Image (cartoon, grey):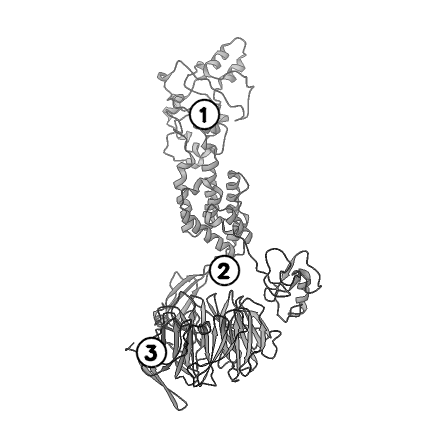
Amino acid sequence: MEKMSRVTTALGGSALTGRTMHCHLDAPANAISVCRDAAQVVVAGRSIFKIYAIEDEQFVEKLNLRVGRKPSLNLSCADVVWHQMDENLLATAATNGVVVTWNLGRPSRNKQDQLFTEHKRTVNKVCFHPTEAHVLLSGSQDGFMKCFDLRRKDSVSTFSGQSESVRDVQFSIRDYFTFASTFENGNVQLWDIRRPDRCERMFTAHNGPVFCCDWHPEDRGWLATGGRDKMVKVWDMTTHRAKEVHCVQTIASVARVKWRPECRHHLATCSMMVDHNIYVWDVRRPFVPAAMFEEHRDVTTGIAWRHPHDPSFLLSGSKDSTLCQHLFRDASQPVERANPEGLCYGLFGDLAFAAKESLVSAESGRKPCAGDRRHPIFFKRKLDPAEPFVGLASSALSVFEMEPSSGSMSWFVDTAERYALAGRPLAELCDHNAKVARELGRNQVAQTWTMLRIIYSSPGLASAASLNHSVGKGSSYGLPLMNSFNLKDMAPGLGSETRLDRSKGDTRSDTVLLDSSTTLITNEDNEETEGSDVPADYLLGDVEGEEDELYLLDPEHAHTEEPEYVLPQEAFPLRHEIVDTPPGPEHLQDKADSPHVSGSEADAASLAPVDSSFSLISVSHALYDTRLPPDFFSALVCDMLRFYAEQGDVQMAVSVLIVLGERVRKDIDEQTQEHWYTSYIDLLQRFCLWNVSNQVVKLSTSRAISCLNQASTTLHVNCSHCKRPMSSRGWVCDRCHRCASMCAVCHHVVKGLFVWCQGCSHGGHLQHIMKWLEGSSHCPAGCGHLCEYS
């Protein structure tokens, strides 16, 4: 701390001097407050209640207010405030619900003045009126606020916030009768101390408890609030409805917020947990703090500017049992460590690039390179010379826009809405999705779906015999396999050797004769394989597919035992009558020689080729040595899914995962699947495809994703009469024994669809509320709340 500088500030004839310093306390502090002359600070906690003098070089203990032999809960302080008009007057909020005032001018050792015991639970906050010396306000965990006149022994007014607990209360600096209160349910209320029966205004400020608030010392209508949602919001209260004018995003729950004196847009915050630092924000730059104090090693519990007209000194107390004075000049500046360069893609393909202003200005006259489709659009924020750190982290933004046609994402929406993911056989799902992709011009995706159908539901999954049988029947799945053979490219010698002379009546035992009109592999249908190097001297027929059933056309390979062949009866148009006689070569020959068969029938039974240009061929081994199970293609399918995911098409990856299910799930790790699912669901929700998103969650193969829509939804409902939380046993309030589902318009029990305002708990029939809000924005129950329905 010795390296820190010293500052002297002149304030109306007096001067504030000091440096960054700290002192060790006897116990953790819960709150601090500064007297009006900025010379002393009071520190209060569960086990400490002391006053320290602020000197140039150090803190000096002046008074210990915890006196007495027995410890009292009245001395266990949750909050402390020092009156800004009477330097001898203090007030504390005790954890046992007692509000205590202290008079430092009393000659006795015990400075305790008055005790107010009207609260039933812990008092979270106490606040003196800024101009009225005898008015004290308190807010408690019991949901009530009480206004005390220090000249009387009891409270003069009680305000019910209709909520579980009051977290903060603050008198307005400019409006004499107005004070603000914040609540556990996220609401902020404005009250007039003359009207304790109802609040003047109420609005929902945060998503969760609102822990603190502070009125701006210069702008009459500005109110800063901080909550558990890690946000600090600035509200303009001068308008008809509270208007959010600024919002600062922090990294932890906001416990305290204080406007910086003499700096209109600066405020200081500290966190309730996790983060130990104190930040000073410029609300116009809500993402990077203007200054940061890092002296504390535990949660900061209280902050206060030393003087209402001096922006240089900040005091703080912490759970690490230290009291610190921070000099603003010595604060670290996060903006110095900020990266002035950035790159980001928009949802529709636009590219934004930020770079140092000096770099952009040096190249401002450059011409777009050949790859630029459009000139970049430059944005530059006007710099305010009065701003601190004006020369740091100043960037210029360039935006490269996509062409309107190229940036369209209509294909994504159409694909998501039209894809079929379940409810049909696998083959139908693949065919349907391939058709959808083809209609949208995504031919590669369509081809992928077709290949998946062939792999997982094609007849090719059967034995080789059934594969060859499908070829004989003209199956479309056999075509790609047979197109590899071009009969016209056969060598002349092979054609002559394999040609059968019908006049000789010779039938070879290892040959099957087919009519050329029944085969699928004619030259006219085989244009895709012209120039193929694959030899064409193979026989593709209706055979069983065993290796010992296909031989080279060589007389030496004739076998004595010939298998029986069964000719298909539906693979080609019949030119003659089929006789139910075993059509093996020996039987055909016997039938041809039989005296009971006519010559025409014998000719038909021999099935000699009609076209002399057709050649019969044979192979020495089966077309498929073994069956290819789906597992054989698993690695290929997984690579395909990763390829689409890396290309950014998580839609295809997730759709295939859902359609194939357990067939491919085991081959991809759970973390990768979860990442794909979350990315796809996020995209669907960005395009408001809620039904498709829910279907993906329901059908997902990832356990972490499928449980997303299985978590129960809880609605916390308050009674519209007594404002107390409703139990889960029914719609009758346990406290007032009245039905909560009463329509505020027609005053009848709602038996159907019920809509209610989350701010005031009043509601009614949907149609009645909608009709009411068309003509008035106030609650129909007359509570004064400004209800909204969208």
- Where, by quadrant of the figure, is residue 619 drawn? top left
The answer to whether residue 630 of the structure is visible from this angle is: yes
Q: CA distance from mark 1 to mark 3?
A: 96 Å
Q: Is residue 696 left or right of residue 562?
A: right
The answer to whether residue 283 of the structure is visible from this angle is: no
Q: CA distance from mark 3 to mark 2?
A: 57 Å
What number is the disc on residue 12?
none
* Image quadrant where one finds the N terminus: bottom left
Give the labeled residue for mark 3: 20
- Residue 450, percent from left and from top: 48, 40
Discs 3, 2 touching: Cβ within 8 Å:
no
Give whichever of 441, 389 is nearer the camera: 389
Give the labeled residue for mark 2: 404
Categorize mark 3 by other alpha carbons within 10 Å: few (<14), some (14-19), many (20+).
Answer: many
Residue 541 sits above or below residue 282 on the image: above
The three-letter amino acid code for the residue at tag 3 is Thr
The three-letter amino acid code for the residue at tag 2 is Pro
- Residue 688, percent from left and from top: 54, 56
Give the labeled residue for mark 1: 541
